[in-house]
Image (tube, rainbow, N blue to C red):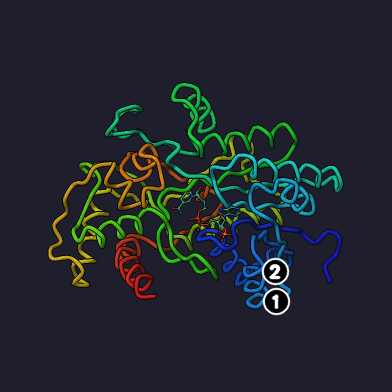
Amino acid sequence: MASSTTPQILLTGATGFIGGTILDHFINSKSPALSGASISVLLRGEDRVAKITSAYGSRVKPILYKDIDDIDAIVASAAQHDVVINTTVGFHPASIQAAVRGLAQRKAATGRDVWLVSTSGTSNFSDTPISKKWVEPENQEFDDAKDDIYGYEKDREVREGPYHQRTAELGAIDLAIELGVKSIIINSPTIYGRGTGLFNKTSVQVPALVRAVLELKKGVVLGDGKGVWDHVHVEDLADLYLLVVERIIAQGGEGVPSGKKGIIFSGNGRHQWLDVAQGVADAAFAEGLIPSNKVESITLAEGRKYMMDGQAPEEIIEKAFISNSRTVSSVARSLGWKPTRGEEAWKQGFVEEVKAELEKNKS
Ligand SMILES: NC(=O)c1ccc[n+]([C@@H]2O[C@H](COP(=O)([O-])OP(=O)(O)OC[C@H]3O[C@@H](n4cnc5c(N)ncnc54)[C@H](OP(=O)(O)O)[C@@H]3O)[C@@H](O)[C@H]2O)c1
């Protein structure tokens, strides 16, 4: 039976690629701090509740809500928890701030520290190599231990104008500071690999390129593909979230940066987009899906159509699929994070995504 001081964790996005993998790793964790903690998940849909309960039984407590606009429900749920791990939509300020407001209520009720562990992405730092609306110095790199990441993002919001994911991230941090809630944002680059959760197991960027290749029946790259980004395997990333949560629970968050210093990166490898395009083309060619592994350039408009089904504006395509965004994850390593999936897993990821897309099309 849980005592009144059993740490209470709330996970949002547990049906997603990132959140599902975090939940799976949480359940399978050998850490006494994590196995001694209670975990709840905010879900939309009775079907999702049923599947989670059938898989995890009483170990996971589902809480049903309407969706991320159900602000009162998010505040009320967060108010019953000490730590909220947020992995839903990284560009929805109201839902992330609702979690912060609920945590502040929890702090007022218990007198204990409360933590938001939230999700953002490195497209916040991207240049725009085609439109040239935002140009960074060549080889610009951001190190979370050395550089003022919060200050850079704040300044860029003003000079470039709002960028949805950055606006959401900064809004959450500012509100958390105002309300005395500790916050750490895990700001991730390209996340690859197959998720290990019960629902969505697929990421965004590499699968989007695979879809375009299979649809156009040729290897493709956006623009000249010279932009450089970082990547991390989803299982290594899940371990980073849990390492942070374990530190919070077992050591009162000692060494975990929060507020303006609490934006940390999670990259564990670096790629050029042209290499991703070639890797996907090679994997599709090896499966006999395209007649050659030659890679041809496509425009932003074509990228929008074939990679994102016309669903995202060209600004997002340019920042997320072709830009430069180099980050150095010094803080995670200083906390003891030891990612184990390297170059081999990254390259194998192209093959896995082609096979997964084929399976999806079959079913
Ligand atoms: N994947 C990446 O490479 C990457 C990299 C950096 C940052 N991020 C950030 O991380 C976030 C999550 O990424 P992901 O890859 O895990 O995405 P995902 O697999 O699509 O998962 C999204 C999660 O959010 C929930 N959700 C979406 N819309 C919702 C709504 N309107 N109301 C309630 N719940 C909603 C989904 O629940 P349902 O099952 O109910 O739809 C799901 O649990 C992204 O939005 C992005 O900001 C992702």
Q: Which residue is mark 1?
A: 57
Q: Quadrant of residue 258?
A: top right
Q: Is residue 289 above or below residue 54?
A: above
Question: Label 1 is placed on what type of residue?
Answer: Gly
Side (left or right) of 150 relative to 255: left
Look at 53% across and 27% down and name the residue there. 154
What label does residue 60 carry, if any?
2
Q: Is mark 1 within 8 Å of ligand 1?
A: no
* Element type where label 2 sits in the image: strand
Q: Are dots 2 and 1 in contact, CB under 8 Å?
A: yes
Q: Quadrant of residue 101?
A: top right
What label does residue 189 carry, if any?
none
Question: Residue 26's x, y, as percent?
Answer: 61, 66
Question: Residue 112's x, y, as percent?
Answer: 81, 47
Q: CA distance from mark 2 to mark 1?
A: 7 Å
Q: Dot 1: within a 10 Å radius of its alpha carbon, few (fewer than 14), some, or many (20 or more) residues?
A: few
Side (left or right) of 291 relative to 344: left
Question: Residue 68's x, y, as percent?
Answer: 63, 49
Quarter of the figure with the N terminus: bottom right
Look at 40% across and 59% down and name the residue there. 192
Q: Nearer the viewer, residue 362 or 315?
A: 362
Q: Tally the numbered discs.
A: 2
Residue at the limit of the structure toward the top, as seen here: 159
Question: Label 2 is placed on what type of residue?
Answer: Val
Question: Residue 52's x, y, as percent?
Answer: 64, 71
Q: Nearer the viewer, residue 211 or 326?
A: 211
Q: Is residue 264 above or below residue 40?
A: above
